[in-house]
Amino acid sequence: MTSGLWELVLKGVWTTVQLLVFSALLATAVSFVVGMARTHRLWIVRFVAGVYTEVFRGTSALVMIFWVFFVLPIAFGWQLVPMWAGTLALGLTYGAYGSEVVRGALNAVDPAQREGGIALSFTPAQRMRLIVLPQAVPEMIPSFCNLLIELLKGTALVSVMGMGDLTFSANLVRLALQQSAEIYTYVLVFYFVIAFVLTRLMRGLEKRLKAGIGKDAGTERAARELKRARTTGVGGGVA
Amino acid sequence: MTWDWHAVSDFMPHFRDGLLVTLQALVLGSLLSFTLGLVWTLLMRAPTRWVRWPVGVVTEFVRDTPLLVQLFFLFYVLPEWGLTFSALTTGVFAIGLHYSTYTMQVYRAGIEAVPVGQWEAATALNLPRRRTWTVVILPQAIRRVVPALGNYVISMLKDTPMLMVITVLEMLGQARLFSQQRFQFTEPLTVIGVAFVLISYLASLLLRALERRLVR
């Protein structure tokens, strides 16, 4: 491979990273808003948030990307820049997955904590911000880490729309060189390295957040495995 | 915003063809991922780390890299090595391989959740290793993991549109072809979007019913 082609690939890496960061930010915002709405006391708020989750979780990310790129401009007259169209489609889809994580973690906070807040006459907003969220957020990190990897893999989809990300640059290189084994291997390794770095970062973040509320990340892991097994219906009775 | 019902009715025959291909890819991909996943799990329990280590690295690699790139890899690289398959076969293989790295974790959790007493009882009854696995451990483990496997079938359904990029005409491929010929994008894309929501919602209801029956 020539240096010109390498430059193309590195540009692709940069686009992928940018898209990942933007859509991760949007997805985080969406998941917190929708996730908290799903624990709201008014049924209509819960219902609307539930419909959002079902619709965006139900449809495929690639179909959503096609929809944002092709239907949105015709139907509503909004033509988005590819980067923002990709961010919107990925952020909304993965935000719906994330909202389930947020809802689960909020519900997992000991009810006594909430009651304590009520007894101390905190407003609902204060209760959420000062009592529930600080305890729920560290519990979300492992699931968010998995979702972030899924999102990274999802960013490859925008290449179908001709956005110059890592996968797209790989296709260009394949066309230029008429060889595929080498470039696709490099690209897979690139993705793997990004995923590896993300996993490490999230693990560090979890440790810091856990330390902030006086929990040890090490001993919590075993407990979490148990809890996860129970929620997926995998866990069985203890002998 | 204009909505043309004629375009919807014209799209329906193509939609049916696409749906059939999608379901075909889904069923075959699921079967492959269930089988391969079990193989990986059992290999990860091998006594020597010379087996465990490579299997662990390869599956981690496959799990953390995009299915889309894996599809391109298989579709363009295998013919270079002299292996030519149809696009659908390649797609099924890629989906099955990708999701087998997820199902292996599900199986592992299921096997670890089998109570230790069951292993001890099998030893006490002097069951050979093979029978311990086939009649004692696996039936109990797989029963527990059916709902989790079902969740991955739904994810797989939502990943089948990716097969479009390697020229398989599944639902999204049909929609794209139709909209390029007729220059009507809104209707076919919305139809398949709704179809995906409906199918995955129905599947999740079915799964919940199954879960109630199997896991007690």
Image (tube, coloured by chain):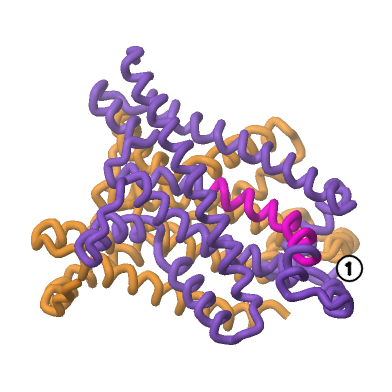
Chain colours: A purple, B orange
In the rendered image, residue A131, in percent from the top left (x then y), is placed at 80, 65
Residue nearest the viewer, comparing B78 with A188: A188
Whether residue B135 is visible to the viewer of this picture, yes or no, is no
Residue at 86% from the left image edge and 68% from the top image edge:
A238
The region drawn magenta spans: A131-149
Residue nearest the viewer, comparing B200 with A57: A57
Residue A146: within the magenta? yes
Whether residue B193 is visible to the viewer of this picture, yes or no, is yes
**Quadrant in the picture for the C terminus of chain A:** bottom right
Residue at 41% from the left image edge and 24% from the top image edge:
A10
Magenta segment, prevailing SS (helix, strand or loop): helix
In the rendered image, residue A59, in percent from the top left (x then y), is placed at 40, 66
SS class, disc 1? loop
Vertical placement of residue A52 versus A62, above or below: below
Mark 1 — residue?
A239
The answer to whether residue A102 is left or right of residue A94 is right
The answer to whether residue A36 is left or right of residue A158 is right
The answer to whether residue A166 is left or right of residue A194 is left
| Residue placed furthest toward the top | A2
Task: Quadrant for residue B126, please give it.
Answer: bottom right
Q: Chain of mark 1?
A: A
Residue nearest the viewer, comparing A203 with A49: A49
For label 1, the crowd category at 10 Å Cα-Cα, with few meaning under 14, some 14 to 19 and many 20 or more, is few
Residue A17: within the magenta? no
Task: Quadrant for residue A177, please give it.
Answer: top left
Residue at 44% from the left image edge and 26% from the top image edge:
A186
Mark 1: amino acid: Ala
Vertical placement of residue A83 versus A125, above or below: above
